[in-house]
Amino acid sequence: MKQSYLSLILLIERLHRRFLDVIKAELDRMGVEDINNVQTLILYNIGNENLTIGELTNRGYYLGSNVSYNIKKLVDNGYLIQERSQHDKRSVKVKLSDKGLAICSKIDELYQRNIQDLQREGLGTQDVDQLLKYLRALEVFWSKFITGGGVV
């Protein structure tokens, strides 16, 4: 069990890096050079919402330590529009610009192609749902451990 558990942890890490490589390859194919794969995922996760930077991290849309840097680059390159909150002038909200919406549309097309390719490879909805079930259970287990609610 220990070896399988350690292999699972390494696989999760490798899958995340590989997925970032998939996004980077798509950006390269599109000739997009002013945004990176992590910034693209931030945009995709924002979608049509109007969020604060804190909300991005609280919702799990961004897990890195340099979210402010990435948001600044996305604003500077025209992918995001930054606005002060009308209710709290200290709070800044971001939303996608037309350029940001366009890149999200292209990434959505990539996801649709990926889904079709996975289905052709024999990985169906039930398989993906089962994987999600197990990975969510692992997430809950780790969360309980962190908060002290897990088995000691």
Image: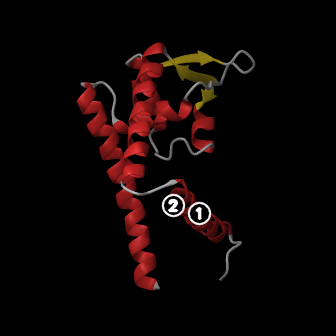
Q: Against 138, is 92 above or below?
A: above
Q: Residue 147 sits in which quadrant?
A: bottom right
10 Å crowding of disc 1: few (<14), some (14-19), many (20+): few
- Residue appearing at x 61%, y 23% in the figure: 93
- Residue appearing at x 38%, y 57% in the figure: 15
- Residue appearing at x 54%, y 41% in the figure: 61
Q: Are marks 2 and 1 in contact (CB under 8 Å)?
A: no
Q: Give the image location of residue 26, x and y in percent.
A: 30, 35
10 Å crowding of disc 2: few (<14), some (14-19), many (20+): few
> Helix, strand, or loop for circle 2?
helix
Q: Residue 35 sits in which quadrant?
A: top left
CA separation, marks 2 and 1?
18 Å
- Can residue 119 be seen in this snapshot? yes
Number of the front mark, 2 or 1: 2
The residue that mark 1 highlights is 139
Task: Specify the label residue 47 is tagged with.
Answer: none
Q: Against 151, is 101 above or below?
A: above
Q: Is residue 15 left or right of residue 54?
A: left
The residue that mark 2 highlights is 127
Q: Give the image location of residue 47, x and y in percent.
A: 55, 28
Front residue of this view, candidates 50 and 112:
112
Front residue of this view, candidates 133 and 59:
133
| Kind of residue at disc 2 | Asp
- Residue appearing at x 36%, y 46% in the figure: 117
Q: Give the image location of residue 3, x and y in percent.
A: 40, 82
Name the quadrant of the C terminus: bottom right
Q: Residue 137 sits in which quadrant?
A: bottom right
Q: Is residue 128 left or right of residue 69?
A: right
Q: Against 86, is 54 above or below?
A: below
| Kind of residue at disc 1 | Glu
- Can residue 72 be seen in this snapshot? no
> Helix, strand, or loop for circle 1?
helix
